[in-house]
Amino acid sequence: MSQTNLHGIHNAPENSLLYEWKRLTNEGLAASRAQCVAHAMGWYLRALQVAHRILTNPEPDVMDDDRLAAYVIAHLNIADCYSLMNEPSNAAECLSCAHHKLVSLLQSSEASASLQIAASRQLRHTYAALEQHHAKHGEHALVEKALDAGRLHMIMPGTRLH
């Protein structure tokens, strides 16, 4: 039976990239809780570098859901830091980047079915973050473009597919 941690990501062996991503992310969370936004940003940027490696060079024991969750969480954390630093344009760019990556995976004929399913699951998180950014900061071209792209792949409650 697999176990998940507070990130919703399955436990990983200590020598894996996923373990390193979790360690860096937890350091960033600790810095955030201590109100050290600049330090948190540093940890989160390092975690994003590892998340990119996890996504582009998958390890055999890392599930696609975990690979994409690490990628999305890293972007969400960085966007939160940008917002706290009163840099909403950078936050918008970060959120849009993650969202467009998910949309591109959904549209890719080369992505595996499991990776596309994982992208579909993660899309709601980036979509919600983009909507929250829009509500807080108003219109931003990147956010609007990302929301429009995401709407094509979102199944809204009560929608019937024929």
Image (tube, helix red, strand yellow):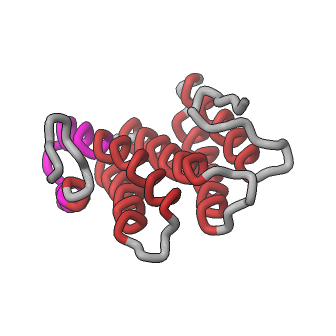
Q: Nearer the viewer, residue 113 or 42?
A: 113
Q: Nearer the viewer, residue 82 or 149?
A: 149
Q: Nearer the viewer, residue 2 or 6?
A: 2
Furthest residue toward right: 15
Residue at 82% over, 43% down: 13
Provide the residue span drawn in magenta: 129-148
Percent position of residue 140, x then y? 18, 54
Percent position of residue 136, x then y? 21, 36
Whether 51 is drawn above or below 13: the answer is below
Residue at 63% over, 44% down: 43
- Image quarter where the N terminus lies is top right
* Prevailing secondary structure of the magenta residues: helix
Whether 155 is drawn above or below 108: the answer is above
Q: How many marks?
A: 0
Furthest residue toward top: 34
| Residue 119 falls within the magenta-colored stretch | no
| Residue 133 falls within the magenta-colored stretch | yes
Residue at 59% over, 47% down: 66
Percent position of residue 131, x then y? 23, 42
Residue at 68% over, 35% down: 27
